[in-house]
Image (cartoon, coloured by chain):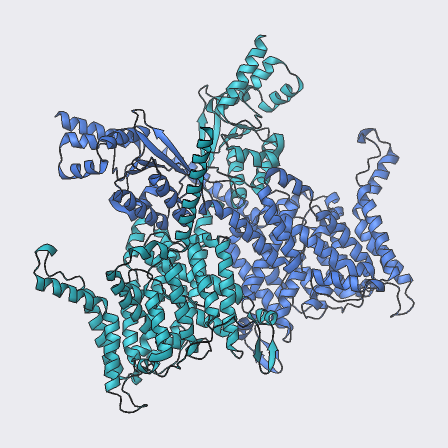
Chain colours: A cyan, B blue
Amino acid sequence: MAENTVEVQRKFKTRSCGRYFRKFVKRRIPILEWLPKYNSEKFFNDAIAGVTVGLTVMPQGLAYATLAGLEPQYGLYSAFIGAMVYVIFGSCKDITIGPTALMAIMTHEYVQGRSPDFAVLLAFLTGCLQLLMACLHLGVLIDFISVPVTVGFTSATSVIIVASQLKGLLGLRITSVGFLDTLIKVFQNIYQISPWDTVMSFTCIIILLSFRKMKDIKLCSDQKKASTCQRILTKTIWMLSTARNAIIVIICSIIAYNLNTSESNNPFILTGKVRSGLPSFGSPPFSTHVNNRTIGFMEMCSELGTSILLVPIIGVLGNVAIAKAFANGGKIDATQELLTLGICNLLGSCASAMPVTGSFSRSAVNHASGVKTPMGGLYTGVLILLALSLLTPYFYFIPKASLAAVIICAVIYMIEYEVVKLMWKSSKKDLIPMFVTFLFCLIIGVEYGILLGVGTNLIFLLYPSARPSVHVDKCNTDSGAEYLLITPGNSLYFPAVDFIKQSVGDAGVKEGSSQLPVVVDCRYVLGADFTAAKGIATLIGEFNNRKQSLYFFNPRSDVVAVLKGACGEEFQYVSTQEELSYLLSTSQDKSSRQLLELSKGKSNESLLLTNLGVVHRNNRSSAHELSEVTTTLLHATAS
Amino acid sequence: MAENTVEVQRKFKTRSCGRYFRKFVKRRIPILEWLPKYNSEKFFNDAIAGVTVGLTVMPQGLAYATLAGLEPQYGLYSAFIGAMVYVIFGSCKDITIGPTALMAIMTHEYVQGRSPDFAVLLAFLTGCLQLLMACLHLGVLIDFISVPVTVGFTSATSVIIVASQLKGLLGLRITSVGFLDTLIKVFQNIYQISPWDTVMSFTCIIILLSFRKMKDIKLCSDQKKASTCQRILTKTIWMLSTARNAIIVIICSIIAYNLNTSESNNPFILTGKVRSGLPSFGSPPFSTHVNNRTIGFMEMCSELGTSILLVPIIGVLGNVAIAKAFANGGKIDATQELLTLGICNLLGSCASAMPVTGSFSRSAVNHASGVKTPMGGLYTGVLILLALSLLTPYFYFIPKASLAAVIICAVIYMIEYEVVKLMWKSSKKDLIPMFVTFLFCLIIGVEYGILLGVGTNLIFLLYPSARPSVHVDKCNTDSGAEYLLITPGNSLYFPAVDFIKQSVGDAGVKEGSSQLPVVVDCRYVLGADFTAAKGIATLIGEFNNRKQSLYFFNPRSDVVAVLKGACGEEFQYVSTQEELSYLLSTSQDKSSRQLLELSKGKSNESLLLTNLGVVHRNNRSSAHELSEVTTTLLHATAS
């Protein structure tokens, strides 16, 4: 019988362990969760979105590789591993991992004048650090990115991306760095606008926006009553609307191909030649050659310097900000995102990739193309592999204007103005971190914008810790004894100490209340630290010098432990209203301190009773225990 | 009669205005407070301390000027203005302002290969920024330096200063940068120790420490019963003990002078020649010449770069950390310190000074010499002016060994180990920021040490904001209705949102409680922001989808405003226990949501009564108002 129970318990334990393990595996490898539910409709959506993203990443990747100071094909090498790894580990369907402008700019500094191996090693180290952060569960850091910062970041990035696409949109052949520089250069070169590109891009934009609207058209209010013809039409419109980005890019490429008279004479600016061939797979480069000199691993690391820390953190911050933007209030598992990004960078570095992270513009394209699961990344990845090995000649003809149109139509819907109204209604203060993030992202760069936004937000968070509300009331006990009740509105941590100390001290010496006992209500004091305890010790000293009483009302036991540790026996507290009333009425006749000293000297029962439940109840904190002590003492007096 | 009252009121107002103004002036010009109480005893103490500090700052100033890449006399130019300005505006008697190693190192970067004018302009800009910070009352930033960080900083600086004096102590002729480098160089050159210097320094140390001890000797337990002889002896010992630093330096200089056989042949390492003459007074240099090229103000500023921000902030941080160390728990007026430092730097820049701040080692010497008021600075300042104009030949003979002994004996008492025990007893967690500050101050530098210590401390402060305690209890109302009571232990700010949301959500769907209504007790929710409101909106949506009720119990009115702004009418809250009981017993029979929808449709009095005081009391928050509504409705039903 007993053995049976043990057996059952063991089985149960094994089963619950197993369940926990399965749950953990599903959380860490999300594909196990959604793959069994995969169907043809999802496949269709994902394939269209994946191919559209693939067509978008192609010219972007080439551009970003150049931006990082690498040969163009490195952009494509960086694009396919991330996209495919995210299928297995990714938790947000919209995100596509790959080369981004931000990572490219951050890599550029360290590659410039050196070898591409530095970029690849940086990707490897970024991956390692991100995995380490995932293991240490540093995902908690991500909680410090608030909605206002996300909104500010998203809107600013949208504006930056629109600006960066202006030259493609207008067919300008200019190079620029950063948002303001791009705007200035575009306006300086406004007379060089190419009519062909401009006409194509604006036509594309109009078509894309109307296709997007078409999705919402319902031919018949009730789906069941619709005729077969109506149903087919609805389905076709839906398909056209979903595949609109891919269709536009393909049609534009065909137009450009047909208008091509010679290699250097096309009315449109084209994507141009992409060098074909897959990258070499192997371990990342732990040493490299620059100017006929071999540079070892340690020297490479020291040259990469702080970027080894900054690149992974900024990468993850950007990625999670994007994930939060698409999750729309849902929970983001930051540790999972860290893990995924880490694997993407680590495996990427084995295929000559530069550091990668989630791309905002392509994620927006992915979202706008109606992606349903992370599987879209697989089709993107396969397309890039195909492109690298076979399709490069065909991608030659993609007009940059059509890509600019696709990107702009995807991101303009990410500029959030509705939420500003809601924020105004709910909490106006939150508009400040939003505008700080937005403006600084535009002016000095996305990475600093996020950091400054988070910083501003932290100041708001820390302000109540430094300057809590302190209420002062003149109260009376039931027996008529007057006292000052002071209620600090926050915990006793170091930034608030001087302020609370001064507030309590000032209240204590105010005219007309200089002889009243002061009671500090610890209702909102959820914790205390050593600095606070030292400050309270000084305060108690000041009150003792003035022979004024200072009591703490109902502090939590952990707060008592901290305060007693630093203040010693001088720290006096009470736990119930009855004790307080009793104490205050006693202290009106005679200083309670004198009473205490008396009671310390003699062990007279009556004195013990007087002293009972009043002061120096060192480690007791419940009324229950107090009543026990009372009973014991009463017995002692009686016998 | 009425006019009389007005007159009295006006008089009272004028008087209280005047009092406020006088109080303000006294706070901002502390000398007005203490000068009237100045007496001969204080004068004697201050003069001895001031002269001792003056004798200490002389060789230190020369060394620090060299460290900053300037000619030696700049160190003395920087020393006297600060010391004298602090007499008028300073609020902490022990602090002496002047050149420090930290400021010298930070200046060095920008002076190197340029002109001394850069250092002077940096002092001017530092002063301006510190005054600006004082005007903006940014002294609040100083509250973020806790006791553990101060203790770590103080102890580390003491250790660093002791290490930096080792070469003077042992008579080594080496140059080193930083704590570790000094230690290594000293051990590498240990065989080059000069016996003369070593003997002198250790003799000095023994004498200084015993003189210090002698202060505590009481020849007679009762002062009144002492004989005249005893009284004179006591007074002499006290004087010797107080003036010990100055006496030692003077005696050692006399010894060195007498042992001087020729200019380059002295058994001791001496301070050496100091160029005499006062600096030129005038406006700071707004343009300069480097390599026959004139550099304008803007170009100088752009070359100084971020140091314009960093130098003033680090200067003030260091200064306040020192002030806190000496105030010993008392309050530091950070705004006043900012103001004083600003004036010191501003006026200093008119006398060719480099940026200055409080010096830890000299403040320790000042303290150990028994300074009583900030007046000590005046004597230091006068001594330096005398030194610059007249006394330079005599300072030539100060042996470095004697100065090293004075500095070491002053700072070893600043290494705090007693407080570590107290911290262990009170709050063990606080040991972490202390050790972080201590170690990083030693290893990577004082400025980073402070910043990292403050950062670690902020993480402890922010952690409860990100991961508050969440208590879940299964409760019953008086009528027997079961519900889940969830009490978050902190305010609803963005870092905690995901965590609280998940905690409440998890509690709601746990086995056996999936149909129970959930009540969130807002007792500790002192505030909320937009991110939290958005999260709560999502949570309410999830509960509505499950047809489970979610109520907020007794939220503060500002929290209600924020949450209602983002959640709209979906946000349901109650303010009293009675309402809650009523609501929960109703929702057991029928979903309260359905009830609501009903009540929205019809305006039946009975339904209104059912709905009364239960849900959607949009902007009312007191029980009083509720009862008013009840009364009105009951009247309406009756009529």
Q: Nearer the viewer, residue A87 or B428?
A: A87
Q: Point out the image quarter for the N terminus of chain B.
A: top left
Residue A381 occupies quadrant: bottom left
Task: Name above or below for residue B219 compared with residue B499.
Answer: above
Residue B155 percent coordinates (x, y)? 68, 50
Residue B636 percent coordinates (x, y)? 15, 28
Residue B30 visible? The answer is: no
Q: Nearer the viewer, residue A580 or B135?
A: A580
Q: Nearer the viewer, residue B137 or B538?
A: B538
Q: Is residue B33 left or right of residue A259?
A: right
Task: Name above or below for residue B284 compared with residue B86.
Answer: below
Q: Is residue B93 left or right of residue B190?
A: left
Q: Is residue A466 left or right of residue A382?
A: right
Q: Residue at x 49, y 68 (%)?
A: A123
Residue A199 occupies quadrant: bottom left
Q: Point out the image quarter for the C terminus of chain B.
A: top left
Residue B209 percent coordinates (x, y)? 81, 47
Residue A7 percent coordinates (x, y)? 45, 35
Q: Is residue A327 left or right of residue A450?
A: left
Q: Residue at x 60, y 78 (%)?
A: A294
Residue B337 visible? The answer is: yes
Task: Name above or below for residue A288 compared with residue B345.
Answer: below
Label tally:
0
Residue furthest out toward the top:
A639
Q: Nearer the viewer, residue A520 or B482?
A: B482
